[in-house]
Image (spheres, coloured by chain):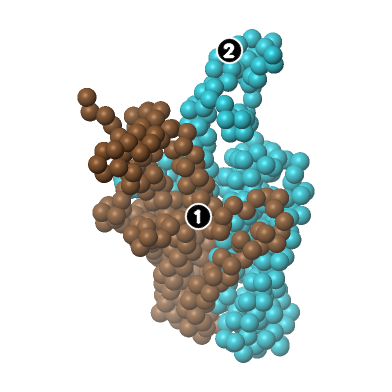
Chain colours: A brown, B cyan
Amino acid sequence: REVISLPAEMDVEEVAQIFDKYNFLALPVVDKDGKLLGIVTVDDVMDVMQKEATEDFLRVGGIPAGEDLPLDPPLVSVRKRLPWLMGLVILNMSVAGLVSRFEATIAELAFVASLMPLIADMSGNAASQALTVAIRGMALGLVGWRDLPRVLWKEMRVGLLAGLGLGVQIGVIATLLWRKPLFGMVAGIALAGTTVGACLTGGAIPFLFKRLGLDPAMMSGPVATTIGDLIGIGLFLSLSAAFRSYLM
Amino acid sequence: REVISLPAEMDVEEVAQIFDKYNFLALPVVDKDGKLLGIVTVDDVMDVMQKEATEDFLRVGGIPAGEDLPLDPPLVSVRKRLPWLMGLVILNMSVAGLVSRFEATIAELAFVASLMPLIADMSGNAASQALTVAIRGMALGLVGWRDLPRVLWKEMRVGLLAGLGLGVQIGVIATLLWRKPLFGMVAGIALAGTTVGACLTGGAIPFLFKRLGLDPAMMSGPVATTIGDLIGIGLFLSLSAAFRSYLM
């Protein structure tokens, strides 16, 4: 009778999927000649999976350097959190550079600045959703590198649909608050662009990172947020500049 | 001999901690008279824990309405993601309202707008770290409601130390880019305030939400980000307004 066994070089996530699917309690591990090397039990696999899930959770949350517990001494936590935040400041200077090219427009149309934090925050929110879905799907073994085109096609459609909803929403709000329907339209297009950019990069970056041998959970959020910012704030300020005479 | 048993009303996280600590494979569940109701095995507990960890991961990532998989149809994903994003737009209008009170300052000092997306993004990053630590600590049973003062005291010190580092960093960068040391100082104080605000609210909100019977992972990110935005952008624009004649 055929005996199910695990090759020694099999990825732990694949092993976990086999245990999960067939409800085995233990499986033999063999080398490439089929010689028994040992036994893996369901406990071992669950421990490893829990460790990986925790790592993903912490890394997506911006704690890449291992566990940081609520009552650890502040200096221990600062050492784990600050280098990450300082890197993100550098990354964000690309957005500051983009905005500073539009100083003349902002001086004339100061009210446009009111919606810049919205675009920045929403880019983070939409990116966070897309990458959570991608990372979870990869951990479950539902998608791999060759699914990237399908994931991108899906995320583009999600971004366009959600962007349409958000664009109409902020368009109505901005028109009511500032009594400028054209400003509402500019804000709506910018928020839609932000959403598409954040969904696409949030969906793609975990795959690209894994392909490059990096952790998919690491840095995906800030990179996708920054790209979403650049697209959204770039659209917003470009359109404001183009229509400045009608917006004043 | 004393038999270890689980009261039927015990919380599943507490049950998991007992299994984890003592490496039991199964434990009896009893009612309040000590009568046997059934047996819980380690598999059951791990399944429940994995389900809860997944829920936390998805909710912190902004997918509150259950699993959203990478290759689900776009409309299914939009239904799970868009209501959440639309709620965050409303929440963010408080930041837009704050910024619009400073239109005169922004018209005069348009270059200050360059750092507004940085403050908004970093508030999200610092909040995300603090709440990841809090939610993980609660899931591990390391902290509960009565530890809130100690968590706040810790997060305040982390926020101040990390804020000091980030403040000095952006102070130096802004001074070099805009040749205005006073603007560097204003940006530094604002970024430090953002960090303290985001750490405190990111650390506190999961506890407050759990106390109110809500899911600690739900909405903590956006609420803490918005409070960090209000503090940081409020400080930044107030100080810019106060020193406007020296910044021009």
Find numbered disc 1 in the image and state the secondary structure of the residue it sits on: helix
What is the chain identity of the residue bearing mark 1?
Answer: A
Q: Residue at x 69, y 16 (%)?
A: B2
Looking at the figure, which quarter contains the N terminus of chain B? top right
Q: Which circle marks residue A60 in the picture?
A: 1
Q: Is residue B152 left or right of residue A28?
A: right
Instruction: Give the residue type that dot 1 points to.
Output: Val
Counting from the top left corner in percent of width and height, residue A76 is at 67, 59
In the displayed structure, would residue B193 be above or below residue A126? below
Residue B221 position within the rendered picture, expressed as x and y whole percent measured from the top left: 58, 53
* Chain holding disc 2: B
Q: Is residue A137 visible?
A: no
* Three-letter code, disc 2: Leu
Per the image, label 2 sits on a secondary structure element best described as: strand
Residue lying at the far left in this picture: please name it.
A1
Of residues A183 and A47, the one drawn nearer to the viewer in this rendering: A47
Name the spot of residue A184 as percent of width and height, x first. Answer: 46, 65
Q: Is residue A121 above or below residue A129?
A: below
Mark 1 is surrounded, within 10 Å at the Cα level, by few (under 14), some (14 to 19) or many (20 or more) other residues, namely many
Residue at left offset 39%, top offset 44%: A12
Residue B37: mark in rendering: 2
